[in-house]
Image (tube, helix red, strand yellow):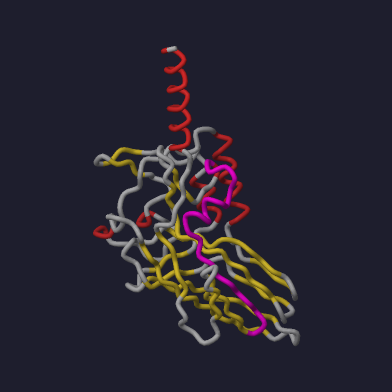
Amino acid sequence: MYRKILGVFACITAISILVGCAPKPHVEIYMEPVAGKEEAQIDAQTGSITIEQKGVRITLEPLDEVELFELTEDARINPYIGIDRWGNVEPLYTVFGIRIENTDNQRVIVDPTAILIDQNGYQYASLPYDYFRDVYGNGGPQTVSNVGYRYYPYPGSYYHNPYHHYRYPYRYRYAYPPYRVYDYYPDPNAVNHARTVARETVFDGGRLFSGAKRDGLLVFDRLALGATDVKVILPEVLIVNQQKQRSKVKFEFDFRQIVNVEE
């Protein structure tokens, strides 16, 4: 009888541990749209902003922890999140979904680089696929110990990112709390799949003919918790209209970062 009870208890304990360690995404940081321009259309349900100019319609939708987690069925191959040993999910980047539609032009050519500027004037460039190829090219990120926490050399802290247009001074190195402890990509196959996910999802610009659409993700280094008002800019969208006349248009989207975490 004792052995049966002990066996049942052990089984329940094991199940509880497994359930407790299952990934548990919940929203701690999110972006909300700001109605800053007359032509901006806001979808309150998705938090997206749509702007249409000269026959080009662009929609930007911020992705929170839960939405990033749902990008892949297997969290181990998701390049945009970290999961600690207790199943807590944390975003490693600030990510926006982007959709571009050519509604009334012969061609629309979009540069792959977008710019994010916070209220203090600090500027980020969107990360290209090459960044993720480098990150996962050597077996994936590894943890290193630092003052009771563990940090990742990859994804690199923003002040080491070669794709930034502006590098933070040293005093901003710890602008947000340290990452939790993660168990990252335990096998090479997971690393390869994570690299593939990045290749298939990172927005890389493109040439859109009349009626065409293009989707992807604009991925920026994770914003500091103190960054509130931010602006995402597509600085050069080249338009060739039906009369073959060329012009360039800039698209700007205003968001506000909301942080619901206990410090």
In percent of width and height, residue 210 lies at: 75, 76
- Quarter-of-image position of residue 160: bottom left
Instruction: Please identify the quadrant where the N terminus is shown.
Output: top left
In percent of width and height, residue 153 lies at: 38, 45
Give the answer, above or below, for where 95 lies relative to 153.
below
Say whether residue 59 is magenta: yes
Residue in the foreground of this view, choosing between 63 and 54:
63
The part of the chain drawn in magenta is 54-76
Q: Residue at x 47, y 33 (%)?
A: 18
- Quarter-of-image position of residue 3: top left
Q: Residue at x 58, y 66 (%)?
A: 98
Residue in the foreground of this view, choosing between 216 and 168:
216
For residue 64, side relative to residue 257 (left or right): right
- Quarter-of-image position of residue 209: bottom right
In percent of width and height, residue 253 lies at: 49, 76
Q: Residue at x 61, y 81 (%)?
A: 52
Q: Residue at x 48, y 46 (%)?
A: 135
For residue 74, side relative to residue 141 (left or right): right
Instruction: Please identify the quadrant where the C terminus is shown.
Output: bottom left
Give the answer, above or below, for where 118 lies relative to 145.
below
For residue 99, side relative to residue 169 (left or right): right
Total labels: the figure holds 0
Say whether residue 128 is magenta: no
